[in-house]
Image (cartoon, rainbow, N blue to C red):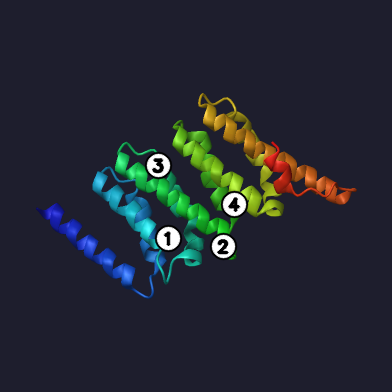
Amino acid sequence: ETRQAADSALSEFLREVRGSTVVEFGPMVPILVSQCHSKERLNRLTAITWLAELIHHPHSGGDALLPYHAEVLGAIVRCISDNEPEIRRVSEATDADLLILVRDTSGTFELSPLLDTLTAELVGKDDVPTKMAALRWVNMLLEKRKGDMREFIPDLLPVLLGTLSDEADRVVILTCQVLSRISLSDKRAVGSRGNGDGDSEGQQFQMV
C-alpha cells in the first residue's frame, strides 16, 4: 500500500513536470541516474521513464539536457542490459531518442565524456544490445563531428579492434561499419589535401 501511494505521488509529480514551463535539470539528473542503478525494479523503471520524459520535455528538453548527456547516456545504456523486459524496452527507446537529440542539435557539447562512457560499455559489457547501442553512438559521432573525432581515434581503435572478436555477428558487422567510416574519413582528409575525387564521404560509405 505504501509503495502504491509512493508510485501514485511520483506519477502525479511527473504530470506536473510535463506541464511545467521550466525544469531544473541540475538537481534531478544525478538522482535519476543513481536510481537507474537501484536494486529495486520500480526505482529503475521510474528513473528511466523520467529520463525519457526529460528528453522530450517541450520547454526545457532538447539542448538544455546537453550538459548532462554523458551521465544520462551512461544510465540509459546500463538499463539496456537490465533483466526486466519492460526496463530494457523503455531504455532502448530512450537511447534512440537521445541519440537523435544529440545528432540533430546545433548546440555544442563535449565529446570526451560521451566517448569515455561508450568505450567503457564496449569494454566492460558482454551483452549484444549494449554493444550495439554504443557502436551506433560512435558511428553517429564520427559522422556528426568528423574533424573533432580525429583526436580520439587512437584511443578508439584498440577498443573497436577488440570488438571484432565478439561472438555476435551483428556486433562484428556494425564494428566493421564504424571502422570503415574512420578509414573513409581519413582517406577524405588526405584527399582534400591532394587532388580528391569529388565523391562525398556519405557516397563512399554507402559503397562499403
Whether residue 55 is situated above or below residue 203 in the rendered picture: below
Q: Label 1 sits on what residue type?
A: Ile
Q: Label 2 sits on what residue type?
A: Thr
If you read the primary sequence from the N terminus, does the residue marked by circle 2 or circle 4 appear first? 2
Whether residue 181 is situated above or below residue 110 in the rendered picture: above
Whether residue 59 is situated above or below residue 121 in the rendered picture: below
If you read the primary sequence from the N terminus, does the residue marked by circle 3 or circle 4 appear first? 3
The residue to which callout 1 is attached is: 55
Q: In terms of image quadrants, where is residue 154?
A: top right
Q: Is 177 left or right of 122, judged from the image as shown?
A: right
Q: Secondary structure at mark 4?
A: helix
The residue to which callout 2 is attached is: 105
Q: Is 129 left or right of 160, judged from the image as shown?
A: left
Q: Is 100 left or right of 202, judged from the image as shown?
A: left
Using the image, tell me which numbered label, if any, was put on residue 80: 3
Contact check, label 3 and label 4, Cβ < 8 Å: no
